Amino acid sequence: GDVSLFSFNATKLVMAGQGGALCTDDPELYERARSLSHHGINQAATGRYYWSTELGYNYDWTNLQAALGLAQLRRIDDLIAYKVWLFREYEAGLGGVEGIRLNDSGPGVVPTYWITAAILDEGLGWSKEDLCLRFADYGIDMRPLFYPLSSMPTFAATVEGRSMVEANPVAYELSSRGICLPNGNNLDADDVAYVIEAFLTILKG
């Protein structure tokens, strides 16, 4: 592709509080993104300071954020190894449970397991929202799997948004029955075992 995008939100593998990065080898795309990220100012093109030629944004990163991001990037192998370990712990406890499918990868794929998701069979009778509420009884902050962007009111009311349900059946199907298992970098084996035990208890009713 022409562009790669990375998020440095606090929930991501490389964390810097907020912000992200755009990578490209296309000089024209780079200059366009750089201009938009700095109030539409392109001094190299105009030869003028503080001169905005288009509506832009303030996406400049602080030096502190950049330092945090660089420090995280230097230990990316350890961060990925932890996420893989976490997935394998969940897989060992939930992988054989009827009605639950985890987001394992296919052949030839090396996943980072940024998130461990559990997809519930429809026959279990749980909505993802109700299931997340039940985990709260155990002091567990469980989150629903992300909703398709086109399902949100801003987009769903448009012609394009209404067509997305049929155009993207997999996204809508997985989203309707998926939850994101806790996967913060502070979880240990006992924490994961507690989540698994709570999950199994809830499913037993």
Image (tube, rainbow, N blue to C red):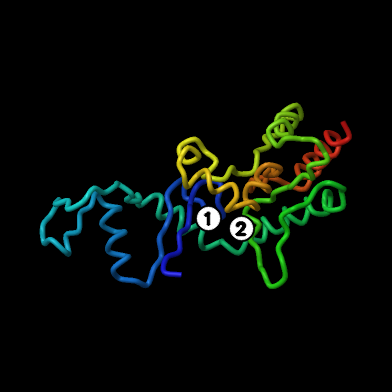
Q: Are marks 1 and 2 in contact (CB under 8 Å)?
A: yes
In percent of width and height, residue 104 lies at 73, 59
Question: Looking at the picture, does residue 22 appear above or below residue 149?
Answer: below
In percent of width and height, residue 35 lies at 25, 57
Q: Would residue 32 appear left or right of 167 to someone viewing this image? A: left
**Of 171 and 91, which appears nearest the observer?**
171
In percent of width and height, residue 169 lies at 64, 51
Q: CA distance from mark 1 to mark 2?
A: 8 Å
Tag 1: residue type? Val
Tag 2: residue type? Leu
Q: Would residue 57 appear left or right of 106 to someone viewing this image? A: left
Using the rendered view, name the quadrant where residue 199 is placed: top right
In percent of width and height, residue 189 lies at 77, 48
Taking the spot 75% from the left edge, 52% from the top edge, the residue there is: 102
Q: Residues within 10 Å of mark 1 (few under 14, many from 20)?
A: many
Using the rendered view, name the quadrant where residue 41 is placed: bottom left
Q: Would residue 97 appear left or right of 77 to someone viewing this image? A: right
Q: Would residue 169 appear left or right of 20 to someone viewing this image? A: right
**Of 63 and 158, which appears nearest the observer?**
158
Question: Looking at the picture, does residue 159 appear above or below residue 127?
Answer: below
Pointer 2 residue:
79
Taking the spot 86% from the left edge, 35% from the top edge, the residue there is: 201
Q: Quadrant of the C terminus?
A: top right
Secondary element type, mark 2:
helix
Q: Which mark is residue 199?
A: none
Mark found first going from the N terminus, 1 or 2: 1
Secondary element type, mark 1:
loop
- Residue that lies at the very extreme toward the top in this rendered image: 137
Pointer 1 residue:
14
